[in-house]
Image (cartoon, rainbow, N blue to C red):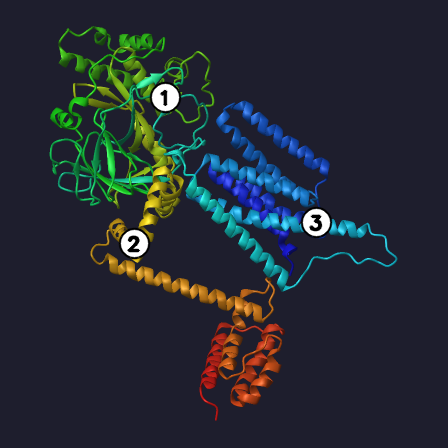
């Protein structure tokens, strides 16, 4: 067996992993199916001594066709954010196309480079766990293939030089080294290179952390929460059913209920439109922030205001699944917070926006709870906001034409609302604001406007504001366009409002009594000021449309996503969002472990056990169950290691090639027990001695053991070389007989 025997197979696997990484990142599974089937077919068509290859001119024509198709796709949607997606798709096609041609080591290297480009493009568009697993396997396989390619290049070079030699006698062709030693050494070399590369990658990861929240931003066009509203992109948004969090909504009596309306969970608040950048931003720096530190007990609520916590309020319990973020998603208006970890949260009293400041933590929070007042009294808001409530002032919205459109809508639907309110009548002013916002919301929910995720027909033109184009020309878009349209109409006529981004919970699981919030539930809506302390939600996106979209995306796989999404949260929390704060915390913890010796390790293990017990809500007996599970996992690991070592020992003793089936290895495994018996009897087997010659040596020392083992030695020869097969019953009886011989060897000789 030589290292190059499976070179072409490993090359196909490496290219397939590159295609799979790109398909998973951009959710293009049709591409994975087509190119994967083509890569597998190339092993039957082009590899082997009788392989058929495409002529070079045909491969070049197909490559030019794929390149032209990619260029056409770019000009059809000339968005710079899709450039790497086009490059990755082109690289996948060219790498698979290379498999059908006649290849030397140089062409194989080109295919490897193209698959690496595809994986790099995939990493720019996604950071999910499945992609990370594929990339790790891809990296290991790439190291293996690159080393095999160097061997292939050396072999081809030696053969070429040997053919050009001029000698008086025939020169035999060069052949690669064969036998067990080259294969074992090559595997050890590959393993060593992979270990060194992993150590270097880990060092780079720890030394150069990612910027804060960098892991939450990708180039892809899939739905998901964003703390900004950017209307510059005109592409197709892909829906994702990935579960990001669950929400349990309980009444003041502690009973989990379903709220009559969809739960809108606020994440970020934006109050000013920037026409130059075409996005909603925060109007001014928020200076009066307040910090609240939780104790780590999820039952101990810390007040966000100056008044004590009212236990008769509604309780919102959020459990993160795959989203790891510093944002706290809360209903309006939260008055107290509790967390499963000791955390310091930052509150903006002006808009009740809450965020984790990431102090002292390596990861993000997994569970938090909020006391919420769905219809807060002015006294409640005053207790939280204090003197930081924004003053009442007319907003600025400098987009020509939107104000005229707002007045046109009111003139057609409610002309009385165009009349100014009496000076000093604040109640009439707030009522007018509410009525105007209701009219605009009903207008945007009408038949003239259509909810759409495909915005490729929404052409962004220089000098034309996208909000004005949405309201007067295109009249289709997703929730960010609807919310921007409503906010623009309100602000253009002096009504104070703000755009809010977060999630809308519409899917309620009756079995769990929880809302399931998915990545596609990311949403944007508007809050209009309807009082000195009051803000009211207005959602111009029809709730019925959101529910229909959610129902249409459900599949049987959704019931099993919680297994993967929990691991995805740990991946995002511990690795994707590893920033400078996490780096400093890790250094402090490592220093504590070194300085405190074993005590720090014990404390850390105890802390992990408490967190696991609290997460699964196992109660006081949870630590016993955790111990049983850990003990069972330890036994399984030990058993697996022993099984692998025994199987490898059998393969070595039988001089079995990798093609030797596992069933034949199991049938010959009794030979190991015989060797153990011979060693106990004082006659271990030398490596050079065949089984029958070794049995004669045993007979001179322990004739009783040799006589009992002779039939099994004959059976071993029949299984190993004669093709004799043992069924399960025969195998158990033979193994029992081998155990009996070992017990005979343990007894002293007569």
724, 664: nearer the viewer: 664
Asked whether the residues under the numbered discs 3 and 1 touch, taking CB atoms below 8 Å apart as contact, a structural biologist would say: no
How far apart are labels 3 and 2 at the CA level?
Answer: 65 Å
Q: How far across and how far down the image is residue 584, in percent?
A: 34, 41
The local crowd at label 2, few if under 14, some if 14 to 19, many if 20 or more residues have their Cα within 10 Å, is few
Q: Earlier in the sequence, mark 1 or mark 2?
A: 1
501, 547: nearer the viewer: 501
Q: Residue at x 58, y 36 (%)?
A: 91
Query: Which label belongs to residue 51?
Result: 3
Q: How far across and how far down the image is residue 655, in percent?
A: 60, 69
**For residue 105, which quarter of the picture?**
top right
The local crowd at label 1, few if under 14, some if 14 to 19, many if 20 or more residues have their Cα within 10 Å, is many
Q: Secondary structure at mark 2?
A: helix
In which quadrant is the N terminus drawn? bottom right
Q: Earlier in the sequence, mark 3 or mark 2?
A: 3
Q: Secondary structure at mark 3?
A: loop
Q: Which residue is mark 2?
A: 596
């Amino acid at each position: 067996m030589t290292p190059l025997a499976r070179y072409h197979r490993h090359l196909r696997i490496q290219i397939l992993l590159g295609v799979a990484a790109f398909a998973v990142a951009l959710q293009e599974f049709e591409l994975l199916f087509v190119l994967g089937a083509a890569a597998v077919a190339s092993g039957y068509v082009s590899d082997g001594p009788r392989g058929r290859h495409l002529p070079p001119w045909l491969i070049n024509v197909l490559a030019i066709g794929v390149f032209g198709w990619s260029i056409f796709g770019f000009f059809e949607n000339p968005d710079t954010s899709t450039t790497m997606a086009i490059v990755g798709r082109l690289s996948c096609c060219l790498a698979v196309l290379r498999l059908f041609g006649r290849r030397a080591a140089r062409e194989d290297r080109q295919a490897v480079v193209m698959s690496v480009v595809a994986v790099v493009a995939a990493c720019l568009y996604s950071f999910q766990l499945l992609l990370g697993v594929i990339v790790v396997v891809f990296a290991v396989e790439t190291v293996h293939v690159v080393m095999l390619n160097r061997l292939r290049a050396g072999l081809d070079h030696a053969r070429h030089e040997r053919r050009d030699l001029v000698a008086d006698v025939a020169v035999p062709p060069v052949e690669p080294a064969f036998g067990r030693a080259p294969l074992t050494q090559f595997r050890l070399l590959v393993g060593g290179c992979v270990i060194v590369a992993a150590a270097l990658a880990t060092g780079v990861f720890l030394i150069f952390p990612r910027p804060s929240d960098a892991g939450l931003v990708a180039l892809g066009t899939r739905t998901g929460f964003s703390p900004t509203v950017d209307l510059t992109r005109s592409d197709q948004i892909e829906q994702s059913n990935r579960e990001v969090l669950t929400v349990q909504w309980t009444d003041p009596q502690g009973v989990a209920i379903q709220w009559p309306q969809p739960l809108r969970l606020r994440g970020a608040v934006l109050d000013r439109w920037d026409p130059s950048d075409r996005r909603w931003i925060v109007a001014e720096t928020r200076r009066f922030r307040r910090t609240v530190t939780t104790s780590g007990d999820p039952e101990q609520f810390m007040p966000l205001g100056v008044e004590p916590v009212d236990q008769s309020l509604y309780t919102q319990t959020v459990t993160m699944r795959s989203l790891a973020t510093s944002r706290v998603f809360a209903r309006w208006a939260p008055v107290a917070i509790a967390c499963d970890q000791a955390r310091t949260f930052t509150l903006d009293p002006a808009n009740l926006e809450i965020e984790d400041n990431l102090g002292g933590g390596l990861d993000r929070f997994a569970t938090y709870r909020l006391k919420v007042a769905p219809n807060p009294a002015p006294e409640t808001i005053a207790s939280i906001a204090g003197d930081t409530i924004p003053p009442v002032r007319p907003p600025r919205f400098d987009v020509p034409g939107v104000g005229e459109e707002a007045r046109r809508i009111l003139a057609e639907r409610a002309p009385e609302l165009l009349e100014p309110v009496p000076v000093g009548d604040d109640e009439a002013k707030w009522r007018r604001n509410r009525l105007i916002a209701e009219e605009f919301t009903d207008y945007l929910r009408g038949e003239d406007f259509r909810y759409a995720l495909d915005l490729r027909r929404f052409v962004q033109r220089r000098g034309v504001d996208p909000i004005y184009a949405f309201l007067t020309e295109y009249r289709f878009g997703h929730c960010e366009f609807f919310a921007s349209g409503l906010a623009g109409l309100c602000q253009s006529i002096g009504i104070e409002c703000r755009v809010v981004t977060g999630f809308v919970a519409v899917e309620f699981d009756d079995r769990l009594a929880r809302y399931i919030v998915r990545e596609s539930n990311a949403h944007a809506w508007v809050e209009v000021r309807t009082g000195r302390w009051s803000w009211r939600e207005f959602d111009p996106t029809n709730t019925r449309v959101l529910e229909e979209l959610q129902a249409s995306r459900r599949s049987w796989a959704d019931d099993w996503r919680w297994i993967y999404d929990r691991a995805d949260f740990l991946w995002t929390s511990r690795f994707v969002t590893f920033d400078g704060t996490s780096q400093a915390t890790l250094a402090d913890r490592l220093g504590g472990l070194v300085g405190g010796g074993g005590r720090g390790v014990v404390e850390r293990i105890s802390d992990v056990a408490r967190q696991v017990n609290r997460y699964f809500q196992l109660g006081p007996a949870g630590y016993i169950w955790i111990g049983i599970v850990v003990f069972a996992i330890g036994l399984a690991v030990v058993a697996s290691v022993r099984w692998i070592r025994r199987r490898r020992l059998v393969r070595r003793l039988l001089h079995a090639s990798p093609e030797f089936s596992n069933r034949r290895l199991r049938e010959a495994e009794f030979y190991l027990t015989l060797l153990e018996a011979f060693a106990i009897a004082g006659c271990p087997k030398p490596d050079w001695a065949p089984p029958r010659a070794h049995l004669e040596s045993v007979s001179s020392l322990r004739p009783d053991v040799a006589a009992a083992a002779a039939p099994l030695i004959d059976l071993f020869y029949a299984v190993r070389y004669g093709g004799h097969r043992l069924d399960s019953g025969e195998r158990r009886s033979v193994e029992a007989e081998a155990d009996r011989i070992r017990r005979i060897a343990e007894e002293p000789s007569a």
